Image (cartoon, rainbow, N blue to C red):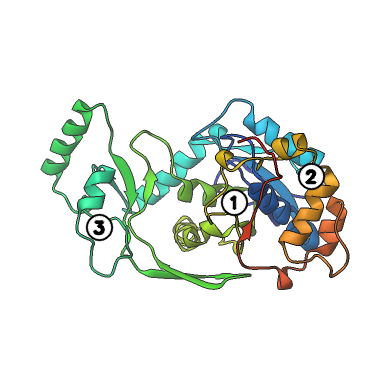
C-alpha cells in the first residue's frame, strides 16, 4: 500500500508517471511517450500515476480531455491525478529550503540581457552567465526599482558552481551536463519546471521517469536539485521522439496528428496500437498489436528503436 504525502517527503511504493501540460490535445508522439510510461510501470510492478502540470499554458478542458483519451486507449491511473496548481505551498517550501542553504538569489535580467551577455568560462552554450549572482545590495535595490517601474519582478535563480553532473539513462547511457544557475521561480511568479517536477516526483515516490528524449538534458539539473532537497534521484528512461517530415516536433499545422483528428480520419484503436508497434520497431517480431495488453506484452525496452520516428498524417487530413 502506498503512503501519500502533500509535502516534500516521499511515499513508500515506487511509481512511474505521465505528466502532460494541459495546453491542448495530445499528438501521437505525446501519446506514445505516455503509453510507454504506462507499459514500463506495468512491466516493472510500479504504480502508474498522472500529473496535471497546469502552472503555465492551460487550455480549459484539456486536462480532462487528455485523461479521456487515455481511458479510451485502456489506461487508467492508479491514483487520482496530482494537480500542480494545488501545490503552490509545497513548491514555496522547497524554494525556502534552498534559500535557507544560501542557494537562491534574485535575477533582474531579461532574455535579451542573457543572450547579449558574454558566457562565463567553462559554461555550456546558453547557460546563465551569473550576471546578478554577486551584486551589491545597493545595486539590487536599483534593479528592483527598475523592474517595479516596468511592472516586473525579479526571477529567482539557484546558485551553483557550474559543476558537471552525470546521470544514467536506461536507453541513452550516461548523460552529463554542467548545471548552471537555473531559474527556480520566474519573474511572473510561476515556479520553474526543473524545481517542481523533482518535488512532485519525490512526493509521489516516482522512482523511474519515462519521457521524451528532448528532456534528457534536464535530467542532470533535476538530479542536482533532488540532492540539494534531500530527495531520492529517480532513474531515467528517455524515449525517442515522433517528429514531422521536416524533422521538427509535431504541430497542428502538420495535419491530423492528435488522437481526435486521427479518429476523425477513420483510425480505430487497433490502428493506433498497430502504429505504435511499427513505430517502435516491433512489427514482424510477434505480429502487430491491437490493444494495450498487446503493447504491454510486446515492448522490449532492450530492443526499443532509439532513433526519431517520422509521422506521416493520413492522406487528406485537414491542417
**Sequence order check, earlier mark of 2 and 1:** 2
133 vs 26, nearest the viewer: 26
Q: Residue placed at 79% from the left, 57% from the top?
A: 42
The image shows residue 144, relative to residue 129, as above or below, that is: above
Q: Which mark is residue 129?
A: 3
Does residue 183 appear to the left or right of 290 in the view shown?
A: left
User: Which residue position is annotated with label 2?
Assistant: 75
Tell me where residue 53 sits by quadrant: top right
Q: Nearer the viewer, mark 2 or mark 1?
A: 2
Q: Residue placed at 71% from the left, 56% from the top?
A: 36
**Sequence order check, earlier mark of 2 and 3:** 2
Does residue 274 appear to the left or right of 85 in the view shown?
A: right
Q: Residues within 10 Å of mark 2 (few under 14, many from 20)?
A: some
Element class at badge 1: helix
Does residue 19 appear to the left or right of 152 in the view shown?
A: right
Q: Residue placed at 71% from the left, 45% from the top?
A: 314
The image shows residue 217, relative to residue 164, as above or below, that is: above
Q: Nearer the viewer, mark 1 or mark 3?
A: 3
State whether residue 249 appears in this view: yes
From the top left corner, tell me how far across and down residue 107 is, in percent.
26, 45
| Quarter of the image with the C terminus in it | top right
User: Which residue position is annotated with label 1?
Assistant: 201
From the top left corner, tell me how far across and down residue 1 is, in percent.
79, 50
**Sequence order check, earlier mark of 1 and 3:** 3
From the top left corner, tell me how far across and down residue 138 is, in percent.
11, 41
User: Pointer 2 and pointer 3: residues touching (CB < 8 Å)?
Assistant: no
Distance Cα–Cα, label 1 vs label 3 = 29 Å
Distance Cα–Cα, label 2 vs label 3 = 44 Å
From the top left corner, tell me how far across and down residue 301 is, in percent.
72, 68
Amino acid at each position: 500500500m502506498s503512503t501519500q504525502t502533500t509535502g516534500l517527503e516521499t511515499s513508500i511504493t515506487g511509481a512511474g508517471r505521465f505528466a502532460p501540460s494541459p495546453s491542448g490535445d495530445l499528438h501521437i508522439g505525446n501519446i506514445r511517450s505516455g503509453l510507454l510510461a504506462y507499459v514500463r510501470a506495468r512491466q516493472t510492478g510500479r504504480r502508474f500515476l498522472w500529473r496535471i502540470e497546469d502552472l503555465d499554458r492551460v487550455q480549459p478542458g484539456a486536462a480532462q480531455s487528455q485523461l479521456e483519451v487515455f481511458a479510451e486507449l485502456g489506461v487508467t491511473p492508479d491514483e487520482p491525478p496530482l494537480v500542480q496548481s494545488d501545490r503552490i505551498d509545497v513548491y514555496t517550501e522547497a524554494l525556502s529550503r534552498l534559500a535557507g542553504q544560501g542557494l537562491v538569489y534574485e535575477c533582474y535580467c531579461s532574455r535579451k540581457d542573457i543572450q547579449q551577455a558574454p558566457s562565463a568560462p567553462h559554461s555550456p552554450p546558453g547557460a546563465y552567465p551569473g550576471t546578478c549572482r554577486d551584486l551589491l545590495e545597493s545595486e539590487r535595490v536599483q534593479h528592483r526599482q527598475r523592474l517595479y517601474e516596468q511592472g516586473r519582478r525579479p526571477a529567482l535563480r539557484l546558485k551553483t558552481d557550474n559543476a558537471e553532473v552525470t546521470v544514467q539513462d536506461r536507453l541513452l547511457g550516461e548523460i552529463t551536463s554542467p548545471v548552471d544557475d537555473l531559474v527556480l521561480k520566474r519573474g511572473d511568479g510561476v515556479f520553474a519546471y526543473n524545481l517542481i517536477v523533482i518535488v512532485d516526483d519525490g512526493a509521489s515516490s516516482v522512482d523511474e521517469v519515462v519521457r521524451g528524449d528532448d528532456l534528457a538534458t534536464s535530467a542532470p539539473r533535476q538530479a542536482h536539485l533532488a540532492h540539494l532537497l534531500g530527495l531520492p534521484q529517480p532513474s531515467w528512461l528517455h524515449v525517442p521522439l515522433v517528429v514531422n517530415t521536416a524533422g521538427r516536433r509535431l504541430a497542428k499545422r502538420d495535419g491530423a496528428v492528435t488522437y481526435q483528428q486521427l479518429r476523425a480520419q477513420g483510425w480505430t484503436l487497433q490502428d493506433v496500437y498497430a502504429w505504435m508497434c511499427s513505430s517502435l520497431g516491433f512489427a514482424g517480431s510477434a505480429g502487430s498489436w491491437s490493444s494495450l495488453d498487446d503493447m504491454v506484452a510486446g515492448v522490449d525496452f532492450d530492443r526499443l528503436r532509439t532513433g526519431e520516428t517520422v509521422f506521416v498524417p493520413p492522406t487528406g487530413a485537414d491542417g
